[in-house]
Image (tube, rainbow, N blue to C red):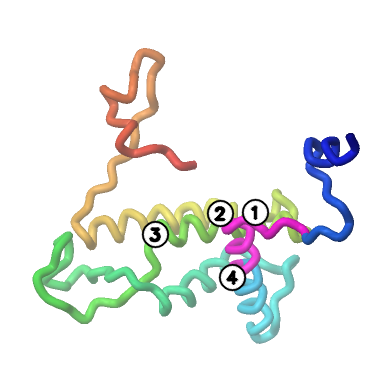
Amino acid sequence: MDRGKELVEGSSRSGDPPPSPSRYESQKRRDWNTFRQYMRNQRPPVSLSQCTSTHVLEFLGYLDQFGKTKVHMQGCIFYGDPEPPAPCTCPLRQAWGSLDSLIGRLRAAYEENGGSSETNPFASSTIRLYLREVKEGQAKARGIPYKKKKKKSKGDDDSTTGGADFPNLH
């Protein structure tokens, strides 16, 4: 009877290993550790309580050097071409979707590690604006329009709005 109670309540015996963290939790921990290391490497080092949206923007700029998404510059002959016929010298950057996911994980990790939601630099309007500009800029550079979704009214269904094709993941 006790064994069944343990299974239902989700408890385990003291000798059982703890369940491994989810992929999301593992990634969040890695991202947080990377950000904290970046902040410790600043001169002078920056503590969590001193962290601002400016530090977050600098971190995102640092990460761009490891990006894999070609972002054509305004003067490039392939600017706005979704399928350029030849290579060019435009830089590789972090993709908007990757940055958006990263910020979401770091926003959660900040608060889980003692930061206040009122002072969370990852949740600031500056970061939201930056992400919007990256999204729009990358879309223009690749010739892919991002259309703002219209809010559904009560009478709409997915077949008329196209909502089934583009699920809202937020």
Q: Residue at x 30, y 60 (%)?
A: 138
Is residue 20 rendered magenta in the image?
A: yes
> Dot 2, crowdedness within 10 Å: few (<14), some or many (≥20)?
some
Q: Disc 3 designates what residue?
A: 96
Q: Earlier in the sequence, mark 4 or mark 3?
A: 4
Q: Disc 4 designates what residue?
A: 55
Position in image of residue 120 (x %, y %): 66, 55
Q: CA distance from mark 1 to mark 2?
A: 6 Å
Q: Nearer the viewer, mark 2 or mark 4?
A: 2
* Range covered by the magenta-colored residues: 18-31
Is residue 50 rendered magenta in the image?
A: no
Q: Are marks 1 and 2 in contact (CB under 8 Å)?
A: yes
Position in image of residue 121 (x %, y %): 62, 59
At label 4, the amino acid type is: His
Q: Earlier in the sequence, mark 2 or mark 3?
A: 3
Q: Earlier in the sequence, mark 2 or mark 4?
A: 4
Q: Disc 1 designates what residue?
A: 108
Q: CA distance from mark 3 to mark 1?
A: 19 Å
At label 1, the amino acid type is: Ala
> Dot 4, crowdedness within 10 Å: few (<14), some or many (≥20)?
some
Q: Residue at x 22, y 60 (%)?
A: 142
SS for dot 1: helix
SS for dot 2: helix
